[in-house]
Amino acid sequence: MLYNSTENKQEVVSASQAIAQGISKDGGLFVPQEIPGYSLDTFKSMLTLDYKGIAKKVFSDYLSDFSEEEISECVEKAYTAEKFGSDNPAPLAFKSYNGNEVNILELWHGPTCAFKDMALQILPHLLTKSLKKTNDGKDAVILVATSGDTGKAALEGFKDVEHTKIIVFYPVDGVSPMQKHQMNTQEGSNVKVCAIEGNFDDAQTGVKKIFTTEEISEKLNDNNMMFSSANSINWGRLLPQIVYYISAYCEMVNSSKIKLGDKINVVVPTGNFGNILASYYAYCMGLPVNKFICASNSNNVLTDFINTGVYDKNRDFYTTISPSMDILVSSNLERLLYKLSGDNDIVTGDWMTKLKTEGKYEVTDEVKEKIKASFYGGYCDDVKTKATISKMFKEENYLCDTHTAVAVAVYDNYVSETGDKTPTVIASTASPYKFSNAVLSAVNNGEKLDMSEFDMVDKLNEISGVDVPKPLASLKDKKSRFSDVVKVDEMPEYVLNALGVK
Ligand SMILES: *Cc1c(COP(=O)(O)O)cnc(C)c1O
């Protein structure tokens, strides 16, 4: 199977090239030229597989220049019970909310307690194999822009991985204290963490710019290095995320919530549009899905886009209690637009150019209709988010994090608006302990407590009785290693310095 750029169909690469390179030279994203189709019989045969088995099947259908042995090795190393707490790294919790069943897909049992681990525990293995196949011994420099969770998950995945270096940029005031502490205490000899003065979009734009600056790439090349990406613009990030939508479907069938072939709805708290796009790819492969419910916080650019077909990032930016979704430029939307426009690289490229120059574009009526047919967009603000955490805790004694709560709230609206009772899977993207301040005040009747981060963790544990994940508990006594803060235009210099390249 080959991949091409969303902005230039002539740019065709192998799977390993797509993963090694991360992003196409023209600025477009790599997409598979054909999506493998699964029949109901294929899904039936997957009902008896464990998570690793499903992962191996999906990976082998997309990564045609990897051998079965290579794929098996990557999967076995990534999804261990040691790292994810059990043999099922993505279990469903069967709950209800406001009288409706919700099946919560817990994607945060990995080493950094956010769903990013599902992809970033395997990406380093895929990437080192890809580098061997394609780039005669060059070291990969992973540049990451993070709204909090990707950074830590990528650091943890790539720490001390041979032939890689990783540099993470995060918005100085745009992540939770726990997220900041997780990143700044990161161990490993090949890691760097730096805050930038700006928001996530500034960090992401800065990183994209470094990627596409010829002069910098040449300098790296002279030093036997090349850039790659661990952000969800990298196909190697998206592919692993397809797996858990299939495994969730199988678990729904196996636990008699649905029959094989029945449709489900999928609700995803969305930022960069990576996670929800993975579910859409699963659907394109044949997974029976009725609606994709795209949940946003007050940064509701996607809600408006789904409702009007106009993407307009010229709006106020809000810092919310669900910081991993504080994003106005959702990079992976580009892949959806490419697909819905009938693999049209020209119009996709035009829209992306408009986004860069005017901050705004409008898709065709045809694309608008396709979006409306499959997607529902909704959003909720911080007050509603906290109320949802509180209500869920009172009703079910179930603690969800701020991002998951946004998804639950938007789903609740969707059901009241549409009356649609299709069985539904809600992606739960982080442990509540990553956002203790907001979650604690939500379950503590809105009362703010003047406490240190780790005292809040203890208090939340006392109130909820929910265990604190070990990786977070063990951070308490760790010393900070990184404290750099730079301006956006200083990012290139920071990178070259960090790499010791002149
Ligand atoms: C990254 C993240 C999101 C958003 O996921 P996208 O793939 O960027 O849409 C939502 N919730 C949490 C906790 C995250 O870390």
Image (spheres, rainbow, N blue to C red):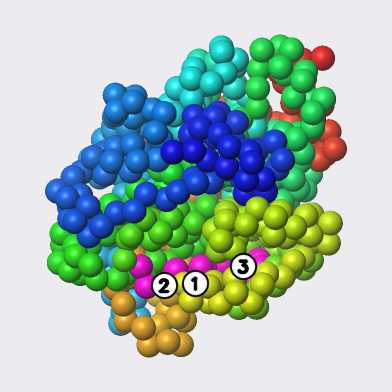
For the point 60% across and 78% down, which residue is it?
307
Quarter of the image that includes the N terminus: top left
Q: Nearer the viewer, residue 169 or 284?
A: 284
Residue at mark 1: 375
Is disc 2 in contact with disc 1, using a CB cutoff of under 8 Å?
yes
Q: Is residue 158 above or below residue 309?
A: above
**Given the current orientation, which residue lies at the most extreme front position?**
10
Q: Secondary structure at mark 1?
A: strand
Give whichever of discs 3 and 1 has the lower sequence position.
Answer: 3
User: Which residue position holds label 2?
Assistant: 291
The residue carrying pointer 2 sits among few (fewer than 14), some (14 to 19) or many (20 or more) residues within 10 Å by Cα, namely many
Q: Quote the CA–CA distance across marks 3 and 2.
A: 15 Å
Question: Could you say which is closer to the camera, residue 361 or residue 124?
Answer: 361
Q: Quadrant of residue 60?
A: top left
Q: Amino acid at mark 2?
A: Lys
Is ligand 1 within 8 Å of the beta carbon of the residue shown at mark 3?
A: no
Given contact means CB atoms under 8 Å apart, are the residues at marks 3 and 2 in contact? Answer: no
Which amino acid lies under the numbered mark 3 shown in the image of this protein? Leu
Label at residue 302? 3
Contact flag, marks 3 and 1 (Cβ < 8 Å): no
Task: Give the extent of the magenta segment.
Answer: 289-305
Q: CA distance from mark 2 to mark 1?
A: 6 Å
| Picture coordinates of residue 8, whole percent (x, y) | 67, 45
